[in-house]
Amino acid sequence: TFRAHNLPEDTWSENLTITISADLIDGCMDSSANNFDANANNDDGRCDYDEDDDGVLDSDEISGCTDLTATNYDSEATDDDGSCEYPQNNTGENTPPTCDVGSNMTIDVNQMVYLDASNSNDADGDMLQNPSWRVVEAPGDSSALITNPSSMVAEFTPDVVGDYTFEFYIDDGEDYCKEILVLTAIITVPGLTPSTVSQSLTKGTEMTDITFSSIGGYIVSMEIHPELPSGLSFNDQSGRISGTPTEAMAETIFTVYANNSAGSGTASVTLSVIEQGYDAKDLAQFWLDFFQCQTTDDRPSVDDLTTSAIENHQCEVSITLNETHLIITTNGLPNHDFESTLACSQAGDCATAQSYTWSIPRTPVNDTTGGHDSTNCPEANGDKECAPDRGAVAVSINGVPIYGPEDGPGGDAVAAEHGAYNEDRQPIELGICHGHAAQGGTYHYHADGNCMHWHPGEGESIENDYDDSTIQAVAQNTYDGNHSKVIGVAFDGYPIYGFWGYDEQMNVVEMKSSYQLKTGETGYNGIDSYEYVEGLGHLDVCNGHFGPTPDFPQGIYHYHTTMQNGDGEMGFPYFLICYHGEADMSSDAGAGQGGGGGDPCAGYGETWGPGIGPPPPGCGGGGGGAGAQLEDIENASRTVLSPYATIWIVLFILALITRQRN
């Protein structure tokens, strides 16, 4: 500070600043940088924002555990914050592994079993190593050894009865564990699968092998009785029947025995051998051989389970031939217990014997003419003749009429039975095997019809053990691993087989129809509810196909019963909906639910009732007759004087006259 004085009065002063330049200090002058230098007076542009030099800016770093081996590894963390946790015990020492060999076991002698320790583990996550199985104790006379003893899963086959004690060992490189497993070997009577099987063979044609295997109990030896026919053999080691039959043989039941010291298990094999297959150009002999109920020995007494009485009904079938047709007469009663259902329980119209005459072509001829009325089979487009929408479309080999799918008011009776829709126009109920009675006691099938080939096991009954609760269950009732047997004949002469047939690879499969419900339909409108989708199932628009069967190994067109389509839904039309061959429609019978090919009013009653459809407009009541073919349908409950009754009446009158004269 400079001061000047004008004494004594005034003083004047002024500050003078002198600046002396200091030395420059280079450095980072940004306080947010990790290398900020508070002494720097010259920013040199070298500020660092990645302290750990990991390539991630400090502002972008995510703290967490970055160790892959830690239990709390954070895949998004870029900056390890020391929080990693590891599977160590509280003391920080290694945890021994834990052995797990499962529960003790009991198996049959000579049955291989797996010794499985694959569930063993290590709490620290250490790698397990050096697995080892060893036999600690075994019956004195055993020489059985462990297979693959240095594996987590070993194999062992006990050779004598008794207890076998095994020890399993494993370590983690530092500590180890051991665990004991006890295996008890016993002997039980062998069981065989399949338990029953049948095949219809053709002379000179190799059979489909049948192999029996154990389902419990070790098999020491196998045998079959009686002796198989020439050309067939039984391998007593593998349990296989194979070969090519060289002679015809009537249906014969063979028994396969599987033996060990505890006893013998058995299985039943039914075989028949026919001469070179049947003639597909003349099926007369085929039908003579396969139609049931032709003799008194083949007419079992059966019961209508709808009633409380035991009726002892009997089926009756007789066949005569002319040059072109089989003339088949039947009484329409089945050869199995059945249910008349509502027509009987509510209307008193229980199944009774009828008098049917069916005319079936001996030589089926494919229909190639076309131009048919497609009303009852619109998906066939007139290429094939439609089966009747109601009434008989075929006859089963036990003489029972096979009907189409529709019920009296025009709905799909089978779909209604399985809950696809509610039939609110008329009470409809199908009984065992999807059959029931209609007006005049006319029993018939709407689907299935395979009960004729179902045989109850010990303690079983058709009422309780033939499962028709779902469409998936029905076909299983008659599955024995083989192609189904024939169950009926259509009016064109082609056979109808059961549910099981050959696919293109000759595998036995459940045959599926190719019809499906149209969008928004339920079956309420019957035939009109469905559409044909080629390739959906195995079968064509009529519900059949050409291919081999056990009876016609050279191939024949044939129909199948179906309960499912290719999607597992309703198997409409269940039997057939049109005729692949030229049909003899004189065999079209109404008999209670539909008119015949001749009189459209035939077969209808005056009123509807359970299972009985109304007559078409313009028809009077009391139809009672069949179609043009099924003449003289009679209700067996009518009072008719037999010749024997007439003789007794005459004798009685003569006795009275003689007594009066005396």
Image (cartoon, rainbow, N blue to C red):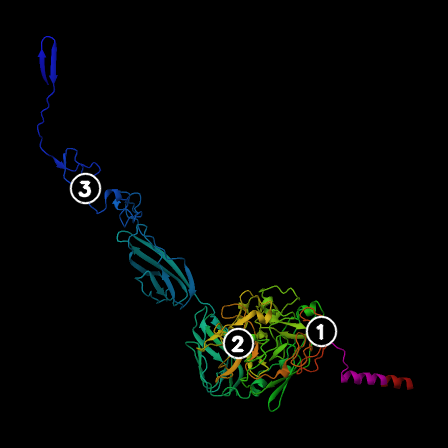
On screen, residue 343 versus residue 166, left or right, reads right
The answer to whether residue 118 is seen in the rendering is yes
Q: Secondary structure at mark 1?
A: loop
Residue 541's disc is: 2
* Picture layout, residue 443 above or below residue 23: below
Disc tally is 3
Quadrant assignment for the N terminus:
top left
Label 1 – label 2 distance at C-alpha: 32 Å
Residue in view at x 17 percent, y 33 percent: 38
Q: Quadrant of residue 32?
A: top left
Return the residue nearer the eye: 232 or 396.
396
* Picture layout, residue 502 above or below residue 70: below
Residue 605's disc is: 1
Mark 3, residue position: 48
Question: Among all residues in the image, which is located at the extreme bottom?
Answer: 323
Q: Quadrant of residue 658?
A: bottom right
On screen, residue 300 versus residue 73, left or right, reads right
* Picture layout, residue 656 above or below residue 454: below
Label 1 – label 3 distance at C-alpha: 105 Å
Return the residue nearer the eye: 156 or 31.
31
Q: Which residues are magenta?
A: 637-653
Residues at badges 2 and 3 in contact (C-beta under 8 Å)?
no
Q: Secondary structure at mark 2?
A: loop
Residue 648 drawn in magenta: yes
On screen, residue 208 versus residue 150, left or right, reads right
Q: Amino acid at mark 1?
A: Gly
Label 2 – label 3 distance at C-alpha: 83 Å
